[in-house]
Image (tube, helix red, strand yellow):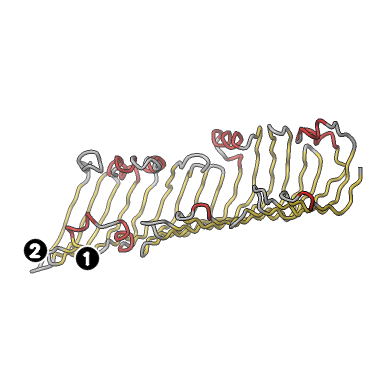
Amino acid sequence: PAQWGGPFPASELNIAIRARHGASDLDIVQLQLDGGELSLNGAGRITDWRNRARLVDAVFRGHLPLVNLNPMLPWQRIDGRGDMAWLRTMFASPGALDIDALQLPDAELRAMGSLGAATWLEGSALDVTLHDVSFAPGFPVPAVERLSGHVSLRKGVLSGRGLVVALDGLSVPSVAFSVSDLAGQPKADLALQGRIDTARMSRSYRRDLQRRFDLAELDLSGEVELQGRYDWSRPDAWSAQGTLQLDSLRLSSLTPKGELSASGRIRARRERQFDVSIDQIDGRLTDEPFTLSGDLYALGSMDLLADVRLKMVNLDLEKLAPWSDELAQHHLSGRLNTDLELYIPKAEPLRTRARGLLRV
């Protein structure tokens, strides 16, 4: 009761048991729980029931709407963790779980309440189908509008396949994941394919995103592929790699004040450092055309290295002023044509190299 802050709220939960017993064993032919639209059926066996009663071969199946499960969860204990607020939004959603099979670990009945999480996870097996589950993790993670698919638990490893996810502005029709060491320091692997479109984002999330990146306007659409790995024991050592096929990007920045539009293909990889490969980006910087390709290594650090090719045709230098206070102070004017290969090590500016065409 201390976990629920009072008696277990089972006033609307009906329990029916059909069993037969022998000299030492009790066969539970059917255990049925019903409450609202919630239903759960199980069967199993209790050995040596007169002395050291032990539950074995316990298997359950059923249909569990999240709103019916909500009052049965120990929220007082869950809320005490401080980082589980998103769980309340999930159990208030219209989604449901179909338990295809839940097998409990074999254990003495009197000891089941004291079994550790690792024992439960290692000894249980679960197959569950999710239907239209939704929850809101909180910014910067967008709200999950719909999550459907199959999740299983085997020997302490939780995995998902055939998952379909619709987030705020991101549709992901193919998701697979695996999480091990759930009771200790979890390790997670994730792979997804989907489409991002900021036009589908809620107004509030889009506004938060623009504020975070100091943008007056942001429109982006494209295809995304991503694989990642995260180890809770080494939070800074996460790795990921992915591809963004950029159909359209248009942004208007506040600082510096200017506009950028582009399309193309970008590949990114993060292990010891964050590297980006630009297959080719065609765009316009304040209405002036450019083409960019190449590689950026150690992005976001003092070891940044840019090895790129930049092409600009008949660029109006006055239109670059909004992107740089230094350029604005020099009142540059005229036209610039470039087709340059640039090698720029941020930590060693004297090693900067440029080769190609530059015409003013």
Using a 10 Å C-alpha cutoff, classify the residue at mark 1 as few (fewer than 14 neighbours), some (14 to 19) or many (20 or more): some
Q: Nearer the viewer, residue 149 or 343?
A: 343
Q: Nearer the viewer, residue 224 or 79?
A: 79
Q: Who comes first in sequence, dot 2 or dot 1?
A: 2
User: Where residue 287 appears, x then y in whole percent?
Assistant: 79, 38
The disc label shown at residue 237, or none:
none
Q: Amino acid at mark 1?
A: Val
Q: Amino acid at mark 2?
A: Arg
Looking at the image, the residue that sits furthest to the bottom is 23
Q: Is residue 108 above or below residue 224?
A: below
User: Where residue 57 appears, x then y in whole percent?
Assistant: 24, 66
Q: Which residue is depicted at the point 60% across and 55% down?
A: 270
Task: Give the SS element for disc 2.
Answer: loop
Read off the residue under disc 2.
50
Looking at the image, the residue that sits furthest to the right is 360
Task: Give the SS element for disc 1.
Answer: strand
Q: Which residue is depicted at the point 41% across and 52% down?
A: 130
**On the image, which quarter does residue 276 sit in?**
bottom right
